[in-house]
Image: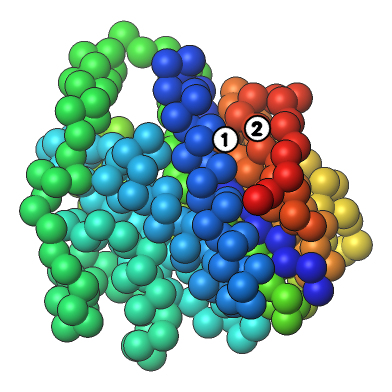
Amino acid sequence: MNPVLVVHGGAGPVSEDVKERVRQGIIRAATVGYGILREGGSAVDAVEGAVVTLEDDPEFNAGCGSVLNTNGEVEMDASIMDGKDLSTGAVSAVRGIANPIKLARLVMEKTPHCFLTHHGAAQFAAAMGVPEIPAEKLITERNKKRLEKEKQEKEAKETDSEPNLGTVGAVALDCKGNVAYATSTGGIINRMVGRVGDSPCVGSGGYADSNIGAISTTGHGESILKVNLARLTLFHMQQGKTVEEAADLSLGYMKSRVKGLGGLILVSKTGDWVAKWTTTSMPWAAAKDGKLHFGIDPGETTVTDLA
């Protein structure tokens, strides 16, 4: 089986001043993940490696680039799933941790549970020796300014304007034919304390089943939760749809049924892949057969050889 790795950097507008940094970040993550697969690593290893790369990049809304809640704090969510046996791990409302996706994997592999939150997740992280970092280390000046701007504009903002719905994610198919997904986010700017979106929720923020494929979603979390976007897309594939058709059907349903915008990356058990979105943009990159495909805006795809 030829390995495949696809990553996304969140749905929503990408301003011109950061576009090149976002493009380089998404390429870097795809290259890291695909490199793990080429060396014989598992799909789980690859998606974790790719998402850690994005969590460590302040251009993306995850890890050190996480946006702030209404109190000006960082609360992060993440989940990961192994399509081989459907094992999964998730964390929500975690603070003071550089890489929530690593903690989600520890939940999957070191506990009998699937999902830990807030204080319990923090206690588990400490027990596992995950380093705690000062909360302010995760807060960037840019995100402080974004929060203030959001608060000032809240009263005047039109309800149908498109926010930056940042999340990061990865899906992979390894040489043994197994798939996995990983999704991580800092949430929505100026949200209520304790709000949890789709990213840590298996079936909404992502899903992986080696008999079907793997998906990671991004966009308006509440809308994604309402339609179980990840599992809905894989259901369409089970009904015989192609990856393109399945993506279009599920994103179209979310838009028409609950007026929700978003995007997804998807890989099938046979290695077909797609990156689709209904927002203005979605940074994405895919690596397969020694080629790297990437883009940000609709109709924009660049293909290069991987070193």
**At 64% from the left edge and 25% from the top edge, which residue is drawn?**
297
- Image quarter of the N terminus: bottom right
Circle nearer the N terminus (2, 1)? 1
The residue lying furthest to the right in this view is 240
Disc 2 + disc 1, Cβ < 8 Å: yes
Residue 175 position in % (x across, y down): 73, 76
The residue lying toward the viewer, choosing from 132 and 197, is 132
Looking at the rendering, which quadrant does residue 43 occupy?
Answer: bottom right
User: Is 292 situated above or below 16?
Assistant: below
Left or right for 165, reference 174: left
Instruction: Pick the residue in front: 245 or 47.
Output: 47
Q: Which residue is mark 2?
A: 295
Image position, residue 100 (x, y; %): 32, 62
Marks 2 and 1 sit apart, C-alpha to C-alpha, by: 6 Å
Residue 61, percent from left and from top = 37, 41
Which residue is at a point 57% across and 52% down the rendered structure image? 31
